[in-house]
Image: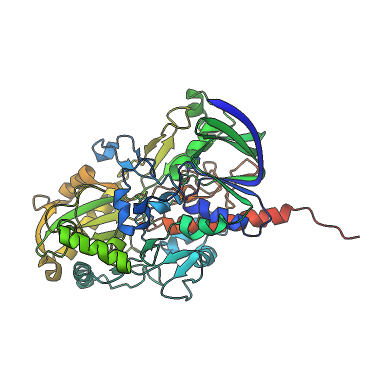
Amino acid sequence: MAATPQKQSFDYIIVGAGSAGCVLANRLTASGRHRVLLLEAGGHDRHMWIHIPLGFAKLFDNPKVNWLYASEPEPELNNRQIIQPRGKVLGGSSSINGLLYIRGQKQDYDHWRQLGNAGWAFEDVLPYFKRAEDQERGADDLHGVGGPLCVSNVCEPHPLCEAFIEAAEQSGIPRNDDFNGPAQEGAGYFQLTTKNGRRWSTAAGYLRQARKRPNLTVELNALATRILFSGRRAGGVEYRQGETTRTAYADGEVILAGGAFNSPQLLQLSGLGPAELLRAHGIEVIADMPGVGADLQDHLQVRMQFRCTEPITMNDVVNDWRHRYGAGLRYILSRKGLLSIGAGYAGAFLRTRPDLDSPDVQIHFLIFSTETAGAKLHPFSGFMASVCQLRPESRGFVRIKSGDPAAAPAIQPRYLSSRTDCATIVAGLNKLRQIMNRPVMRRLIAEERMPGPACVTDADLLAYARKTGTTVYHPTSTCRMGSDPAAVVDERLRVRGFERLRVVDASIMPTLVSGNTNAAAVMIGEKGADMILQDARASAPVAISA
Ligand SMILES: Cc1cc2nc3c(=O)[nH]c(=O)nc-3n(C[C@H](O)[C@H](O)[C@H](O)COP(=O)(O)OP(=O)(O)OC[C@H]3O[C@@H](n4cnc5c(N)ncnc54)[C@H](O)[C@@H]3O)c2cc1C
């Protein structure tokens, strides 16, 4: 590979133009005072299916926009390898995700604070959620308007969703019109990060505007391969673009925003990580940090599939060319209809035990059915609902498998390796079955296809979870924030023991939040940017007047 010596110098270098990276690029360039380089391993976000919400299902196996990772064989899931899609494109995973807008629970952030992370309680992070948000329903104590991230209602109610919500109500789960409102518990419709029926990734919301600024340089198809250090101070990044290796220098900071798989990978490739692992791959150890890549957490989901008695599912639309063209035409003319929906139409947050303070399970209710994620819809009327445990105890890891920066790391979430996780998933499946057995729902069910009537006991349900469970695509915590020896970053997201190096993305979450993780990643980008700018102001030389 040709090494081209080209000295490029900036104030900040951001690695990764994903959910958090695009927020950083916007906020750090807004004053015009800082020169920022944004490195993105993927390319432009021009692919048609990125912008049409339902198109997320077409991006699961597209190497042009997706890293297409897979886990190592999962011991508690019958040694199955679980797909681990990640966005590799401007907007990162916010360009390929299921668009649901959920912040999590107040308790999640208060817990982060209780773990010792000053400045991360709910009252501290709420202003950043609000600053990011452009809420279609207007502003109130918990919501903001005028921010770069558009949050919209689903375009119209659906009879299957209405039945599901009513059945949940009859099961003691209240109707909830705002999962990001005062209480998360309940059943209702999800809101989406869309604007006028189009996906609103952070590339659309934050980066598009920032790219007009002369102080932002964006390099596409640029894979950061190593952080450059002078002692314990980060000074630049080496990256590959095509056949060329380039070096960029940062007078201010290097900020990693590569996401929960790639940020720990880049730290390990750069000599920060478990010493034995690094040595095994011929990497010089700068700091023995066992926490880098440890503590991987993810949401496991287990789906139930149903055959529907009425032709009102999305399968019926997609499998009939007249309906399909009708839906396409409707979307073109009004940006409404089936093409404008995300990964879940309706859903619920519920407690599997009455003694719990807050919901421990999320249900995604989908008005279509497939065998696996991204596969063809079934040729019959069908729908699905999945159970996901919100705060898993299972912990896994991300570890490099080679010193080659282009090689995928080993990813192992170790789903269901905790007894509590097994019990919660089973309890959630039992709750979901109770909802589905309410008459208002049962009249729409011709057959429970999976797990099916032969699956009766808790042991059967656990075996089913092990056989079919898969990810909801929410990996976090591999560069965990904290003050204990295994924590990777401190509460200002600075890599512990290093200068001028931060991680600002989903990997810093001390624990998974109770919901879908994009909103939290955007919040982390907003708060991270503020901290970087505050620290820059604090260290700026003070002008002395004569
Ligand atoms: C299929 C799918 C569905 C999802 N559905 C939802 C949902 O409905 N709602 C929700 O809230 N969340 C959802 N999520 C999760 C959510 O999108 C992520 O948690 C969030 O986007 C993570 O943000 P991030 O900034 O940490 O990383 P990312 O957004 O993944 O960004 C990382 C970026 O860094 C780039 N990068 C990585 N390494 C390098 C390198 N070495 N050099 C240069 N660039 C690099 C990547 O290409 C990427 O663009 C989903 C995710 C997926 C994949």
In the picture provided, is 52 more to the left or to the right than 213?
left
Question: Which corner quadrant of the image does residue 183 belong to?
Answer: bottom left
Q: Toward which corner of the image does residue 236 lie, by quadrant? A: top right
Residue beneath the point at 44% across and 41% down: 261
Q: Note whether residue 249 is visible.
A: yes
Quarter occupied by residue 320:
bottom left
Q: Position of residue 352 (x, y in %)?
A: 27, 60
Q: Residue furthest right?
A: 546
Task: Look at the picture and state if 326 lies above or below 220.
Answer: below
Residue 26 location (% of width, % of height): 56, 57
Q: How is the image coloured?
A: rainbow
Quadrant assignment for the C terminus? bottom right
| Residue at image location 73% in from the left, 52% down from the top | 539
Q: Is residue 470 above or below residue 210?
A: above
Of 177 and 19, the residue lying toward us: 19
User: Seen in the image, is 302 located left or right of residue 257?
Assistant: left
Picture coordinates of residue 354, whole percent (x, y): 29, 65
Can residue 367 be seen here? The reply is no
Given residues 70 and 355, the one toward you in this image is 70
The residue at 27%/59% (across/down) is: 364
Residue 98 horizontal/vertical position (percent): 34, 56
Q: Residue at x 36, y 42 (%)?
A: 413
